[in-house]
Amino acid sequence: MTNLLHRPVCELLGCRYPLVLAGMGGVARAELVTAVGRAGGFGFLGMVREPVARIRAEVEAVRAAGVSRFGVNLIPAGTEPALLEAQIETLIALAVPVVGLFWDVPPALIGRLRGADLCVVCQVGSADEARAAEQAGADALIAQGVEAGGHVRGDQPLHTLLGELVPAVSVPVLAAGGLADGADVATVLALGAQGAVFGTALIATPESFAHPYHKQRLVTAKAADTLLTEDFHINWPPGAKVRVLANSVTRGERGDPYAGTRTVIGDEEGRPIYLFSTDSPLRSMTGDFEAMALYAGTGVGRIDAIVAAGERLARIVVETEALLAVDASPTAELGAQGVGQAGRDELLAALEALLEAERAGARVALHTAKHAPAELVPLVRAIQQDEARWCAVLTQAIQGLGGTPSRRTGDFYVKAMAIEELPARLAFLNRGQRWVVRRLQALLPRVGDARLQTELAAMLDAHEHNIARVATVLEA
């Protein structure tokens, strides 16, 4: 059975689908990692600042459950040096398949892990960090957009970051930040990522170690309920922003986070939980959960139920494959059939131009949907899903002709995002779709391959339909 989501990073990590559980401290433990692994994804145990006894126990639990490929996520900058050294020695001794690192790029540590034959994945927030991590020996990268829940390293929207980062490195890139469903996965794949990382969507599962209070807050929250703040800072380096759900702390009702005094608001098995700490509510905690760090990414508005991790991933797979669904016959067939009146080079150039336009349209729609009024979100998301689908169709067609799909978006994206008023931006987006329609109308009669002609005709129909829908909205 064809796996439309398969990418080279799946071979590196040892998973069926490039769908990855973020290594969330406290939340991502053996139960959740096991569920994700059994569903065909890849999970990171979140072991920041955890004692080596817990790391051993969690690793052993995952292996005992029959999941052999998984990772352990550490945060050197947030861990006391002696504990970090003990953690590293433990991971090497346990021969953990993959180690995830976040917040900084420690070349010596990356080299040490690679020297012990461990795969290293670094989460980064900029193209410069990505290049540094690759140079230090990282096997793969996670590009974290500003939409992510929890600690946020960079300051760029995910689609912008991918546009800069993917062309800058040669190792596989996974995308993280505000992702919640299959449309998001299809979009980041179209933007050059090889897979998607999920945090918030997998906190809201029975298997996560988050406290039920945190899970329920996620289910009822909207994207607009999240914000970036430095109020939760105890246990982390200074100046570290986190994305959380708004609460009494972020509203300033609990006093000055930097006053210097420490107030205990909870307990975890004898360990005090302080007001303004980076601890999020866990099953093992008691206390004032409302005042703790309720981590959530901007995709939280599309999480409306607590669903088993395997079920959630299965749904994401189905949604993504529906968007990527194209004739999966051997790609050589297209070239063998010939390209009719248009020569190969001419057809490749036309398809590349269309791909750049579709990728730009997908990025514009992705960003616009995050800020559009509720009544317009379904329309903009439908356009985004269409654009992502056609990116996949065009990519496969180009590869079938022996070409290399472009990762560019041209000037359209920059011009569209410079338009702040939503009606004007939608009108500009329609202009772009009309351009695609004209190009397709001119190209279709010159395509001799029946399969490609059918796909491009469907693409033409979809664009004409979306143009009409947007025009109706603008007229209203």
Image (cartoon, rainbow, N blue to C red):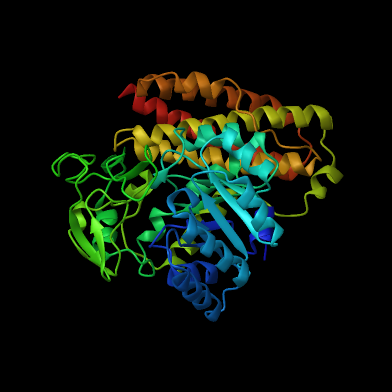
Task: Write the residue at 38% across / 40% down.
Answer: 240
Does 203 appear above or below 371? below
Q: Nearer the viewer, residue 455 or 356?
A: 356
- Would you place residue 49 above or below residue 261 in this image? below
Q: Provide residue 149's location: percent of width, then percent of height.
A: 38, 47
| Residue 329 position in % (x across, y down) | 74, 55
Q: Position of residue 242 (x, y in %)?
A: 35, 43
Up the image or down, 174 lies above or below 74; here it is above
Viewport quadrant of the C terminus: top left
Query: What residue is rendered at 29% in x and 37% in y?
Result: 375
212 w.r.t. 447: above or below: below
Residue 265: x and y in percent read 18, 57
Which picture quadrant has residue 274?
A: bottom left
Q: Which residue appears farthest toward the bottom when viewing the image? A: 64
The image quadrant where one finds the N terminus is: bottom right
Residue in the picture at 55% in, 55% down: 100
Q: Tell me if residue 341 can be seen.
A: no
Identify the residue shown where x is 27% and y is 41%. Answer: 231
- 372 lies left or right of 66: left
Q: Is residue 91 left or right of residue 272?
A: right
